[in-house]
């Protein structure tokens, strides 16, 4: 299902486009020599750890037309609309001795033919590129995450309630080894968080060090220290802060099981007041744009809490694997946006509203199961998360939900897909006046089905229908919407190396 995005991208979208161009250029520069760069850095960048050369990619583009019965997502008085769309997506996984590229992009351009909204560009890009300066020891890393976030967490996501967000980081990773089994990893980053509308633009300096020892062929233990300095452009509404963590890490990578565990603590030092920023929608606003107002202040000062993480990836058969993650940490909206994933439903999601630049305590757990055979793919995922804002309790929220994706190749030319996603949010301490449009306890569910016909190696015709249901326990924003699209596209057969699970 297409998500919706404002077209006035300003500085955010050009940064993302430049990032795509750089990732493509590095991918084109792959050389044939074997080797790899280094393992995952302290900042979550996924560098290659294998010695083999890998070249894998998929891409596609399509165009078509669709119809919605409720373009404004209104509870009553629905307005139908015809929508023209152009879509493009790609995945790149390139590894060689000097360059690694791992990127995923999914973009759409929507044109509302009855002019309910202006032209809309939307999508998500997550990409990491590594260039080896000294192979095996010194690597320069470039990472970019581009997507959308809501402006107001209490109202549905329409083009008037969404903004572009881009998080870019770059810097070196240095890996030193002593005696064959002891190692020291040092990383440094400069990062830029850019928001289209919200006043949370910031420059960030990050550094980390890990001192550890290999305890087996695929296992290691280490002591780690991270520090981050965040400096905001708008210091009238935001207070600069420093966040530091210290923790022990154990990881093991086997033939069927990958396990990572971390345990330690995080300290945040911040001076000044906390500010909650809410969009206020007024008829006189330019093109319906939100006006940002300050609504609540308080002083967080120093903040500390435990850091814990468990990641388990278990291949339970040649066709199935189980994924489980859980943890607790102190984080902020920009860091959380950078680590967001779309899950297994193939539905692009909008990140939660960044209503404050303050740090918050995040506790979470996710579980997923993936199954793949020659003709059938099945994936199920579930997530629970609780966010606590020590100085702004009105933003405390509990989110939980689940999704599934079933795809079956019916014949050589026809493929059917059924997917669904259900997600619930509850802000227990938020209270909205009765005359204000919004809801503090709501659930959003999407059920979709598609039928795809392929001819030859590249031509693809697809019909898809989605039903979106937004139910509320309080407030006045509940709605139902049905969308249907017919598209024709060019999508060459996938490179087998991009498949996560082997077929048999």
Image (cartoon, rainbow, N blue to C red):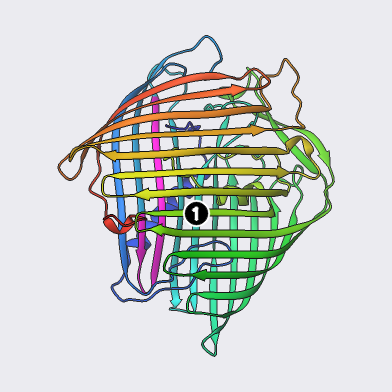
Left or right of residue 163, residue 267 in this image? right
Residue 284 placement: quadrant = top right
Q: Main secondary structure of the magenta part?
A: strand
Residue 106 on the magenta span: yes
| Residue 7 placement (x, y as % from top left) | 48, 33
Residue 305 placement: quadrant = bottom right
Residue 300 on the magenta span: no
Res 72 seen here: no
Image quadrant in which the N terminus is located: top left
Task: Decide: is 434 above or below 450.
Answer: above
Residue 462 placement: quadrant = top left
| Residue 18 placement (x, y as % from top left) | 44, 52
Task: Decide: is 75 above or below 407.
Answer: above
Image quadrant in which the C terminus is located: bottom left
- Which residue is at the front of the view, 83 or 264? 264
Q: Residue furthest top?
A: 77
Left or right of residue 302, residue 175 in this image? left
| Residue 461 placement (x, y as % from top left) | 23, 33
| Residue 211 placement (x, y as % from top left) | 63, 78
Magenta residues span: 92-111
Q: Which residue is mark 1?
A: 323
Q: Is disc 1 surrounded by few (<14), some (14 to 19) or many (20+) residues within 10 Å?
A: some
- Which residue is at the front of the view, 289 or 257? 257
């Amino acid at each position: 299902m297409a998500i919706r995005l404002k077209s006035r991208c300003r500085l955010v979208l050009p940064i993302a486009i430049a990032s795509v161009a750089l990732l493509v250029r590095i991918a084109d520069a792959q050389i044939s020599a074997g080797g790899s760069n280094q393992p995952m850095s302290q900042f979550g960048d996924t560098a290659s750890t294998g010695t083999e050369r890998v070249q894998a990619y998929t891409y596609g583009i399509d165009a078509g037309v669709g119809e919605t019965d409720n373009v404004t997502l209104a509870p009553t008085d629905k307005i139908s609309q015809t929508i023209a769309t152009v879509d493009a997506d790609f995945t790149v996984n390139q590894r060689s001795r000097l360059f690694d590229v791992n990127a995923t992009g999914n973009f759409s351009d929507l044109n509302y033919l009855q002019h309910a909204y202006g032209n809309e560009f939307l999508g998500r890009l997550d990409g990491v590129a590594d260039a080896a300066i000294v192979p095996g020891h010194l690597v320069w890393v470039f990472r970019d995450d581009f997507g959308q976030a809501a402006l107001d967490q209490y109202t549905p996501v329409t083009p008037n309630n969404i903004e572009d967000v881009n998080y870019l980081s770059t810097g070196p990773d240095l890996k030193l080894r002593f005696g064959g089994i002891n190692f020291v990893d040092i990383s440094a980053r400069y990062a830029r968080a850019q928001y289209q509308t919200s006043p949370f633009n910031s420059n960030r300096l990050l550094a980390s060090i890990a001192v550890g020892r290999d305890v087996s062929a695929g296992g290691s233990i280490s002591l780690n220290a991270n520090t981050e300095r965040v400096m905001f452009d708008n210091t009238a509404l935001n207070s600069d802060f420093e966040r530091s963590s210290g923790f022990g890490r154990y990881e093991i990578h086997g033939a069927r099981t990958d396990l990572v565990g971390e345990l330690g603590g995080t300290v945040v030092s911040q001076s000044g007041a906390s500010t909650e920023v809410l969009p206020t929608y007024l008829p006189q606003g330019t093109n319906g744009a939100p006006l940002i107002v300050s609504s609540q202040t308080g002083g967080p000062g120093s903040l500390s809490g435990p850091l814990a993480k468990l990641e388990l990836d278990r291949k339970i058969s040649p066709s199935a694997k189980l994924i489980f993650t859980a943890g607790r940490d102190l984080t902020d909206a920009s860091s959380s946006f950078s680590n967001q994933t779309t899950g297994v439903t193939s539905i692009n999601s909008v990140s939660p509203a960044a209503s404050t630049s303050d740090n918050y305590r995040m506790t979470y757990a996710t579980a997923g199961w993936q199954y793949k055979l020659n003709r059938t793919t099945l994936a199920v995922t579930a997530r629970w998360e609780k966010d606590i804002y020590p100085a702004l309790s009105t933003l405390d929220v509990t989110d939980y939900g689940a999704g599934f994706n079933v795809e079956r190749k019916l014949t050589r030319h026809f493929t059917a897909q059924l997917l669904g996603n259900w997600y619930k949010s509850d802000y227990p301490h938020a209270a909205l006046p009765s005359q204000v449009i919004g809801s503090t306890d709501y659930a959003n569910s999407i059920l979709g089905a598609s039928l795809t016909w392929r001819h030859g190696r590249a031509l693809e015709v697809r019909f898809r229908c989605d039903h979106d249901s937004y139910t509320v326990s309080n407030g006045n924003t509940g709605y139902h919407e049905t969308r249907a699209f017919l598209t024709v596209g060019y999508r060459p057969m996938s490179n087998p190396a991009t498949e996560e699970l082997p077929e048999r």
